[in-house]
Amino acid sequence: MMAVKTDTLKLPKLRFAPSPTGFLHVGGARTAIFNWLVARKYGGSFLLRIEDTDQERSTRAAEEQIRSALRLLNIDWDGEPYYQSAHRERHLQTAHELLKQGRAYRCFCSKEALAEKRRLAERNKINQRYDGTCRDLNPAVIEQNLKDKKPFSIRFKVESGQVSWNDRIHGQTKVDNNTLDDFIIVRQDGTPTYPLAVVTDDHDMGITLVLRGDDHIANTNKQILLFEALQWRVPQFGHIPLILGPDKVRLSKRHGAASVGEFLEQGILPEALFNYLCLLGWSPGDDREIMSREELISAFDLNRINHSAAVFDVKKLFWLNSRYFAGLPFDRIWKHVLKWLKQAQRTITEPETERFRLLVSLQQARCSTLSELTNGLTVFFETPEMYEEKGVRKFFLKGQSEKLLVLLKQEIEKKEARFFTDIEAIEAFIRQFAAEREVAAAKVIHPLRLALTGSSASPGIFELCYILGKEKVNKRIEKALQYIPLARAAVTEQ
Ligand code: GLU
């Protein structure tokens, strides 16, 4: 049997249909994005359907998380979300329609009898499909069973033949009906099964293109059979290949991070994640990589989606993110920093603000994620508790470092606090200090940086002295000077 073909790209209606049972996986986010791009490109609509029929696993919290991840990625859906669980009666009505038309039947086989048949089939290594016991029951038997209130499920009658559809990604696809048995559409407890609910909803929502993960290919033949039996227009289908980790196994938390929330927590910007996910299994056909949403909408083309699974490249995501990060307006960074300050319960006083803002912009230039940036701001608040080991050997214990730090501290003490408001004067002072002692400026700068930050990498040292001010600089040198003899003793003991 051929699926009815329609040109869905004229005002297409698409949907994203997450089950609210966990966080939004980046694979799910990419499915949502691809649907959204098609809808926006062709002036169609993009609907959100919450597939919450599994009462035990679905939670409001998961739903809220999915919605908020979509909002952060700036994927807007049209209208109100469609809750699958609210349409149960309608799903059952569809099943009764199929019963009435003889396309479905009541199956009175008990769970025990079915389990026993399965066991036997397994033992004899034969196919475990339903054997059709109730397919052609005598109407009188059915009537009696109903009178006796015998529990029943409803099964769809699969006729011989095949289902074929022109998959928007994989092309012509055919599945023989003999791979199916008469599958259940309503369980014994009266609940509709997944294929019945999905088909009814897709029809009622007017969906013209079902674009979803490859893992749903196995459901498509059942769904097309239902559409056809109900004489409903069959939507087009497209199945997007999965996302794998570097070990070629489906990307999961085991690989470090797999959900939108986890990547955002790592400091990835939503717009960078959006851009990266668009390029995962799709490309514009030229060498563009950093693309605005408008460019992505106009370049997006279902025909260019890869047929094979995509490997998630974390390095590329971080690279892309660094490009977005460098271009972020300061105001946006500042807003994030203010939020971080509040969360970290840190305060900056009014007179400190300008110097702190300079630190923020210097860190923006050095970092590629928001979390890296905020980590780099703690230097403003904390006297180092520890010093980088390699740095200690190289910059604290070698040569005249200790002596130079003692002298530098004495010189700084002589300066007025006001002196620390002029970056150029600080630079001239440190360079002159080194020249007078006939050492290269680096011999002063490296130990000083380690003393101020605990690390051998930081924004420019002169700016840093300005940012920290006289008091903090002196206190930190003093602390380093207390530490150096201890470090020396520890090294000698080794
Ligand atoms: N609820 C299904 C899922 O989360 C999607 C079903 C569909 O797209 O048809 O995988």
Image (cartoon, rainbow, N blue to C red):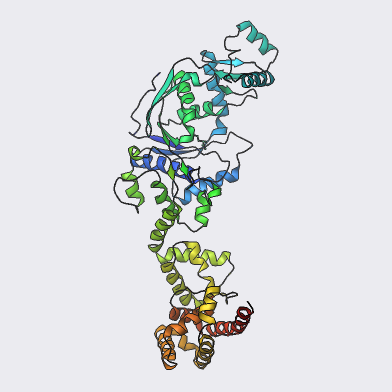
Q: Position of residue 8 (x, y in %)?
A: 35, 31
Let me know if residue 388 appears in the view.
Answer: no
Residue at left offset 45%, top offset 50%: 73
Image quarter where the N terminus lies is top left
- Location of residue 299 with respect to 209 vertically, above or below: below
Total residue callouts: 0
Q: Position of residue 489 (x, y in %)?
A: 63, 82
Residue that extends furthest to the right in the rendered view of this protein: 148
Image quarter where the C terminus lies is bottom right
Given residues 89 and 1, the one toward you in this image is 1
Where residue 228 sits, quadrant-wise, is: top left
Let me know if residue 192 appears in the view.
Answer: yes
Given residues 358 and 101, the one toward you in this image is 358
Where residue 492 sits, quadrant-wise, is: bottom right
- Location of residue 382 with respect to 316 vertically, above or below: below
Residue that extends furthest to the left in the rendered view of this protein: 286
Q: Position of residue 478 (x, y in %)?
A: 58, 85
Tell whether 115 sits left or right of 395. right
Tell whether 327 sits left or right of 49. left
- Location of residue 409 with respect to 268 vertically, above or below: below
Q: Position of residue 236 (x, y in %)?
A: 39, 29
